[in-house]
Image (cartoon, rainbow, N blue to C red):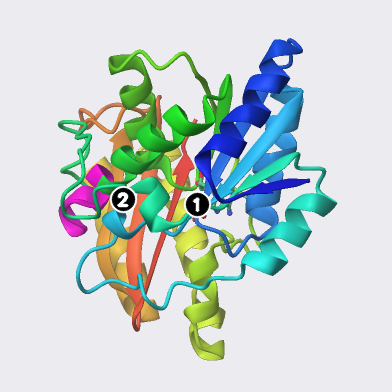
Amino acid sequence: MFTFTDLPELRARVRAWKIEGLRVGFVPTMGNLHAGHMALIDLAREHADRVVASVFVNPTQFGPNEDFSRYPRTLDADAAGLAAHDCDALFAPTVATMYPYGTGNEVKVQVPDITTILDGAHRPGHFDGVATVVARLFNMVQPDVAVFGQKDYQQLQVISRLVRDLAFPIEIVAAPTVRADDGLALSSRNQYLSPAEREVAPTIHATLLSMREGVRGGRTLAAVEAAATARLVAAGFAVDYATIRRADLGAPADHTRTGLVALIAARLGNTRLIDNLLLD
Ligand code: AMP
């Protein structure tokens, strides 16, 4: 596996692959890789001849009181895991490579509408940071296809809109969420949980399943949302939202029963967890 920290070497390698007629896949990450990330690498391999992964903890997508400084950084282990998964290249840039004018003085990419609801409302500026770094990474790597996890459902919608509106010639592929046996979606942030919190955390997935049953059983969406919030609060969560939306994240009419997604963001202690479930 090639490892690049600088842009010219990355570009030369990708250019050489493209001259050979090879299709290049890309998986952007913040590192601390787990089986969910590796499933994205495997899926990228199905859609491309060569796979590039990036590891970059992007400062511009963290709020001032969020976990940027304590976010787990495990580059050596990540590189070993990627190599074992037949990843062809790892791009691990510095902040200076990603933001040559520094952060706070960077050109920003702002996707409208869907970035100010749900996680965007609870994490102001988060999706501006995501769109800004992904646009940069797309220009740097110049992949033919990029894979994103459905676990970050709203992020996937933001990226899809970014790619269409700015006409990036990149196919976006969504990967299903990888879960622990007890249903908890794998996440680098799960390791912040105490043993007691880790016991409680699968309640999020259980609640999503009960939301699906509620919708299938004909209850009003408002009643399903209220029951979900109550269940999470009873388990000890501080709930940011437990909601049912259309697949495009618009508000559904209450009689809607198809094309829906249930989304939860809830905090256990200092750890904020998100998850979602397509209801069809
Ligand atoms: P992150 O490193 O958390 O920014 O995530 C990098 C990519 O991995 C994103 O596209 C995420 O949606 C995806 N991802 C994270 N956790 C999972 C998971 N449990 N299952 C599938 N994809 C995931």
Residue name at image x 18 percent, y 51 percent: 125
Occupied quadrant, residue 131: top left
Residue at figure coordinates x 63%, y 21% from the top left: 15
Residue 219 visible in rendering: no
Residue type beneath disc 2: Val
Where is 257 relative to 92, above or below?
above
- Evaluate if marks 1 and 2 touch, with contact meaning CB atoms under 8 Å apart: no
Q: Residue 87 or 190: which is nearer the viewer?
A: 87
Give the labeled residue for mark 2.
224
Say whether residue 189 is left or right of residue 267.
right
Across and down, in percent, residue 190 comes to 52, 72
- Residue 126 lies in the magenta stretch: yes
Q: Which residue is mark 1?
A: 93
Q: Earlier in the sequence, mark 1 or mark 2?
A: 1
* Dot 2 crowding, Cα within 10 Å, few <14, some 14–19, many 20+: many
Q: From the top left corner, tell me how far across and down residue 227 is, in percent.
A: 31, 60
Query: Predominant secondary structure in magenta?
Result: helix
Residue 260 image position (x, y, % from top left): 38, 32
In the image, the segment drawn in magenta is 119-128
| Visible residue check, residue 243 | yes
Q: Where is residue 122 drawn, in percent x and y?
A: 19, 58
103 is within the stretch colored magenta? no
Near-viewer residue (269 or 97): 97
Label 1 sits on a secondary structure element that is: loop
From the Cβ of disc 2, is ligand 1 less than 8 Å away? Answer: no
Above or below 207: residue 87: above
Identity of the residue drawn at 26% across and 28% down:
255
Q: Quadrant of residue 128?
A: top left
Amino acid at pointer 1: Pro
